Image: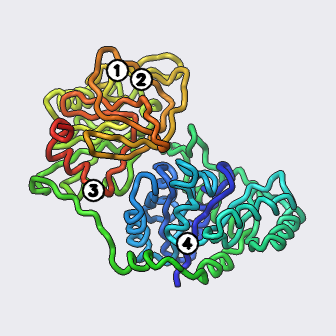
Amino acid sequence: MKPKFLIAAPSSNSGKTTITLGLLRLLRNQGHKVQPFKCGPDYIDTKHHTRAAHQVSINLDTYMMSENHVKDLYNRYSKEADISIIEGVMGLFDGANRMQGSSAEIAMLLDVPVILVVNAKAMAYSVAPLLFGLKNFNPNVKIAGVIFNFVNTESHYSFLKDACDDVGIEALGYVPSNAGISIPSRHLGLAISSDNDYETVIENAAQHLAKFIDVDRLLALCKSFESTEKDTILVEEKEVNVKFESKQNSNDYKIAVAQDDAFNFTYFENIKALENLGEVIYFSPLKDAVMPEADLLYLAGGYPELHLEQLTANTSMRKSILDFCSNGGKVIAECGGMMYLGNQITNADGIGYQMTGFLPIETSMEKAKLSLGYREVQLEGKIIKGHEFHYSTAVENENLPTIGNVFNAKGIEVQTPIYKLRKVMASYIHFYWGDSNFIADFIADGIDNMII
């Protein structure tokens, strides 16, 4: 049986991403084919996973996706792997609404054991009731072992092992503090700037973990874990693949996708859905002169606020995108992509930079305020889900049409506008369409016919 496990923690900032990256690289260096996954809507951790494992990391999210889709993704991508590793999100039981979308829910759905990462820097035997609570709160969550992070001495670790012995969870090692394995953060997530030497950090993490964690025992524990979910086995035997059908020969579609340091917050399955509908052509609003000819333009989110001078200076690109939008081109613009379609982006210092000028809005990084959460959009009876995560604010310069009703994970309506101008749909929301026909309908009919 192949080893599989989910790395979780009692809370955020426990170091689970660093340990995940180190394990992915360590196991790959040992000659294993390792398949990474990420719980939740994060599109940054998956990039680091992919670098560490040399294997594309896949999002698993039980709020944005159906349970069958989550199972299908897990089984499809782990099928050819020697080891499958899922990184959890936030604390083990933290979900969008109680446990919905939590690491625990995904561990139960996929029937995989959990390896806990506990920040024990300021804790000794008091870790016992914490571990006891995590183990017994929901017995259907199978906790196989624990790794203690930010522990610098064997004597400290001995107190933690005593706690593990009394609770009945196996201690698999400890990780001393090490500045050389720290990935810089931006906002709530890890940074992804090409200026950072992530390769060195990940390799350092792999070597560091190899000294202090009993990886062989970890794999043996998880390999011996017995699956009990019959429906998971059935999905493994018969994969459920979503087929995207368009009203036109899919080979006729050309889809332009912005992809560079400013725009890159995409879900892998969203891109696969686009590839099912035609030819995906990547381009850079930062470096290329003009956008490619296309039937659909996808401007995903990213960090345009870090590249304002370069975006403004590329006047030919801004004009080509403005012309495409103005002449009836179909566009989906998410968060940073929406900001780029506006008149101006103002940086944190109050300096404004001209953007494409299609949407009569201005966005600003001044007085940054976090907007965060899952979103459900209802469009004339159709539902599409996604996630909102930004610090900027947007101001409309004139009345701009909006469509749909937007709700958070608890079903409360929120005032996140989805702008519709000509055939452009723009919003702060990062949409997930990997298991729906939304994008096929959009490219075939445009947003006007979809909402009539």
User: Can residue 338 be seen by looking at this rendering?
Assistant: yes
Give neighbour class at mark 1: few <14, some 14-19, many 20+ (Cα, 10 Å): many
| Picture disc at residue 199 | none
Q: CA distance from mark 1 to mark 2?
A: 6 Å
Which residue shows up at 32% across the image and 70% down it?
A: 240
Position of residue 416 measured from the top left corner of the image (x, y, whole percent)? 41, 31
Say whether residue 51 is left or right of residue 158. Answer: left
Query: Which quarter of the image is occupied by the C terminus?
Result: top left
Amino acid at dot 2? Ala
Amino acid at dot 1? Ile
Marks 1 and 2 close (CB-CB < 8 Å): yes
Q: CA distance from mark 3 to mark 1?
A: 30 Å
398 shown above or below 323: above
Amino acid at dot 4? Val
Mark 4 sits on what residue? 112
Q: CA distance from mark 4 to mark 3?
A: 27 Å
Amino acid at dot 3? Ala
Position of residue 111 measured from the top left corner of the image (x, y, whole percent)? 53, 72
User: Could you say whether the residue bearing mark 4 is in a helix, strand or loop?
Assistant: loop
Of residue 21 and residue 328, the one placed in the foreground of this image is 328
Q: Earlier in the sequence, mark 4 or mark 1?
A: 4
Mark 3 sits on what residue? 273
Q: CA distance from mark 4 to mark 1?
A: 46 Å
Which residue shows up at 31% across the image and 39% down it?
A: 299
Closer mark to the observer between disc 4 and disc 1 = 4
User: Could you say whether the residue bearing mark 1 is in a helix, strand or loop?
Assistant: strand
Closer mark to the observer between disc 4 and disc 3 = 4
Say whether residue 137 is left or right of residue 361. Answer: right
Which image quadrant is residue 170 in?
A: bottom right
Q: Earlier in the sequence, mark 2 or mark 4?
A: 4
Mark 2 sits on what residue? 394
Q: Earlier in the sequence, mark 2 or mark 3?
A: 3
